[in-house]
Amino acid sequence: MKECQQELYTCESEFYPFGYSQNDYSTTDTFHLSENVTFYDERKSNFRVTTTGLLQFDDKFRILSPQLFPIRRYKYIAPYWANADTSRCGQLFYRQTNDPDLLDRAASEIRAAFPVHEDFEITNLFIVTWDEVGYIGSQNDKTNTFQCIIATNKGLESFVIFLYAHGKIQWTTANRDGGVDGLGGNEAVAGINAGDGVNHFTIPGSSTPDIINIDETSNVGTPGVWMLQIGKRYFVAVTSDNDKNNIVFEYHAGSDFTLTCMVTPTPPSDSEFRWSCSTGCVVDGKIGQTINITELRLTDSGDVNCSVFVDGFEYTSKPIELRVIDRCQPELCTCESEFYPFGYFENDDRLLRPAGFSSDISPSIDLSENFTFFDERISRIYVSDNGIIHFELDHSLVNRRVFSINSDKFIAPFWIDIDIRGNGQVFYRQTSDPDLLDRATNEIRKAFPMYSSNITHLFIATWDAVGYYSMHYDKLNTFQCVLAGDGYESFVIFLYAFGRIQWTTGDMFGGINGFGGDEAIAGINAGDGVNNFTIAGSSTPDIIYIDETSNVGIPGVWMFQVGKRNDKMDCKNLVKRCTGKCKRQYKQVRRSCKKILNRGSVCSGSCTAAVKKFLKDEVGNLIWHCGNPKGILRKIRNAYDKKC
């Protein structure tokens, strides 16, 4: 048995007086206090004292075995949470008191531990003592003795004091929690838990064998004594420079105003401020007493609060509601409603959710019309869930971030480790819908005034509400890539929905909670070492703002011209090599093609008539003899349409 020396440890004789001689209660019923206790943001007057080393604010809920904090919904003060048994030995005692001597003692001890509270006065104490309590399954071989005091000044500020008698903490675990002879298994926990998932404190050693030495530890310099503030000295509220209402703020897309974390009284100048969101915003944990509304990256209406950290304690405001009105305004940003139509109702194909794999690639997609990609005619593409379109079946490319500008060919609206196993879809289709072709043509002509032709083919790929590796869906990204071409000139359009780019990195590339590490890349690479473009912010934290950037003056829209073929028709390779009866006719077609279609002059009426005759007579004869090899009629008609 450890011997207690008052100058070194906390002895049981130094406990606040307890027991039958003090008229203490000894049942486990709910107890009503004469004065409220401030427990973080709430005022509490009812406690339920349990033999398990807990003070419980709500007797509707009870967790049988000790757990590390934080725990949501449950509000606990836990001097030593373990499954004690008083049926064989020990006793539970508690009472409230306003004895002047005890009030003065507690006030003096708290002032000494917290100098900032030098004027603190106590008006009420609640004293709970677990005296030589055993554990469930014990034979009185080991017992624990400890005490909890709650001190308050009319409910304005509150503190708890935990006292552990030296040598009197002898067991950590009941048999029902896996203990053997009072040790091992699911061991005791000590601390406080506000039940909000944010405010909590756990004494070091909790849930480990070291908790048995709690009588030799302290946060105030006296072994066996722990003191914690559970009621606010600092009151925190959120205000704005454009609205005096500190409960609801209305936010319009494009709005620009500042939120301020107001603290009363004024905290020390070196205090840290932090902003957090329960729902509705992307960037959590921003630092600073003020924050611009745009920094929260609002995606929807939700709650926001701020915290200030003083002397190791966190004081948090009540949540304020940011009500998003017209979250996305087309004149200010790109809204998801402005995407090219996609999804099930458009009969899109989609990537399957890969079972047990982090990425997926579509089957080869044969384009109905070739897509000019710089100097190459592309007829087949692949779509990856990792935010990339490429032209060869290369599984390694989508799962790596190092690529060669001299060989790797790709179009990457947002290349990163996307995970669609639990949420989100990747849709794709090709279309020649006249309305969509007209839309693409008009948008491209506006961005590229030198383009005067008409788009004849679109390929649309959409990454809709996709999460990040590995199976994280607290933040989601939505973006679209459109390949537009007329058989000769081709363009790429990237669309990013405002507020819907919420993460930059998955776990695979070193991200934590969707940020940091090797962040997303957006751009195009021809694989020739010359033609490539990377959108500003790629591979940096700034890529999160890609929905607010543009190269065509519309936030969230990027357009690129990626191919322009020579207007001359490749007459030599129009058809397969002809033999037999059609060989002579083929040569005549090729000569006529060169003469009429590649003359280089602006088409006139005589040119048009000559071409029509060419199509009707010479090509018609070739098809009659050779069976339209390689779709010659369509190719020549396309060439004619381009030329004339």
Image: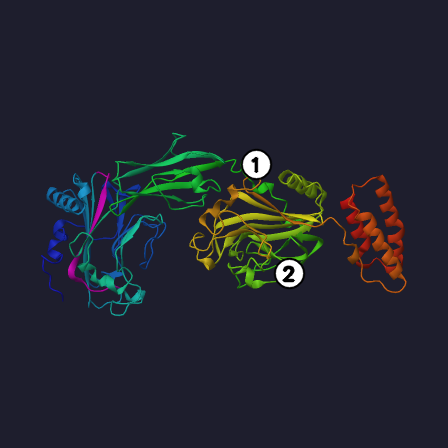
Label of residue 330 in the image: 1
Please state which amino acid type lies under the numbered disc 1: Pro
Q: At numbered mark 2, what does the secondary structure look like: helix, strand or loop?
A: loop
**Segment colored magenta:** 154-173
Q: Earlier in the sequence, mark 2 or mark 1?
A: 1
Question: Within the magenta stretch, is there residue 295?
Answer: no
Q: Look at the picture and state if 192 lies above or below 256.
A: below
Q: Of residues 291 and 160, which is closer to you in this image?
A: 291
Q: Where does residue 319 sit, x and y in percent of width and height?
A: 38, 40
Q: Residues within 10 Å of mark 1 (few under 14, many from 20)?
A: some
- Main SS, magenta residues: strand
- The residue labelled by disc 2 is 363
> Which residue is painted at 73% across and 48% down in the image?
567
Q: Residue furthest bottom?
A: 180
Q: Look at the picture and state if 319 lies above or below 518.
A: above
Q: Where does residue 381 sit, x and y in percent of width and height?
A: 65, 57
> Which residue is painted at 10% across and 44% down in the image?
101
In the drawing, does residue 219 fall left or right of residue 346?
A: left
Q: Where does residue 447 sit, x and y in percent of width and height?
A: 62, 40
